[in-house]
Image: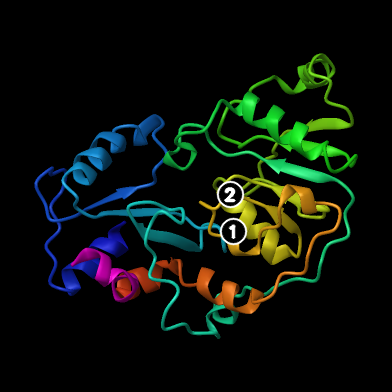
Amino acid sequence: MEAFLNSCRGAGITPVENSLDCDAVVIWSILWNGRMSNNKRVYEHYRLLNKPVLIIDVGALKRNITWKIAVNNITTQGYYGHTVNLDYDRPKKLGIELQEATTGDSILIAGQHSKSLQWEGMPSLEDYTLNIVRQLRQHTERHILVRYHPRCQPFVPFHRFSIFAQNNNLKNCSMETPQAIVNTYDSFNLEFNYHAVVNYCSGPGINAVIAGTNIVVDPKSLAYPMSIKLKQIENPPRKHNKDRWLAEISHTEYTVDEIAEGLWLTRLQNALE
């Protein structure tokens, strides 16, 4: 945030703290939870006035190294300015490259936080999971692994998931508990050696594409151009233009140095005028 504010000053933009009467506002995250819960009021105030809300959030590409910056949302409903003036060498500069296709057998349902604006209009996590599993069962008998967001309480305790699955006739399903990675601030283990990853619209969808895994995501996800449909789960079509998608997605996040230099402003200027 300090790098962001310094870049504003360098561009002749005057930052004002804690004001509801500015031309635009910047907030950290759209997760209305804990210390960030008050951001919801600020977000809604500025959106009601049709003024831009700049959102900074943890990145999906290189966690705690690159950071998302977007206008009004961090889904496809937001603005990143990431589809024009592409630098096709940017993924390499960030140390990101597409991996070979994975060969796993299971399907992962990667959950996300229910208190995030990204989840707006969605059912409970329990209903969502039940619905996805039942849809998958129309097309596949593969093992399904359910993984909840590491900072969102699971809809059913881990040790009771087998009973939950039995009561709801969920065959060949299990649950995984995210494990914190030692010596990191807030990173958790997440592998992508699956046949497919189902994710609504958060980071795992993006990560899975880069890892070479099939994905099923919502149109709100930035990974949607690479998504297959549930009915294609056993015969996934080959996705083209992955290199362009990777170039585009690499223009949605910035290192701290790039934020300080104001690189974000060259991308988002049109949405701020």
Q: Amino acid at mark 1?
A: Tyr
Q: Is residue 268 magenta?
A: yes
Q: For this view, does 167 lie left or right of residue 93?
A: right
Secondary element at image label 1 = helix
- The residue that mark 2 highlights is 218
The part of the chain drawn in magenta is 264-273
Which residue does the image show at 63% across and 78% down from the upper left? 243
The amino acid pointed to by label 2 is Asp
- Left or right of 213, for residue 62: left
For the N terminus, which image quadrant? bottom left
Label ID, residue 237: none
Q: Residue at x 46, y 34 (%)?
A: 121
Q: Position of residue 244 (x, y in %)?
A: 58, 78
What residue is drawn where x is 34% and y is 53%?
A: 55
Instruction: Give how far across and how far down residue 236 sits, in percent.
Output: 80, 60
> Which label belongs to residue 224?
1
Is 65 within the magenta? no
Residue 190 visible in the displayed image: no
Is the residue 68 above or below the residue 92 in the image? above
Residue at (23, 55) in percent of width and height: 52
Residue 221 lies in quadrant: bottom right
Q: Along the polypeptide, which appears first: circle 2 or circle 1? A: 2
Structural crowding at the residue carrying mark 1, measured as other residues with C-alpha within 10 Å and reported as few (<14), some (14–19) or many (≥20): many
The answer to which quarter of the image holds residue 213 is: bottom right
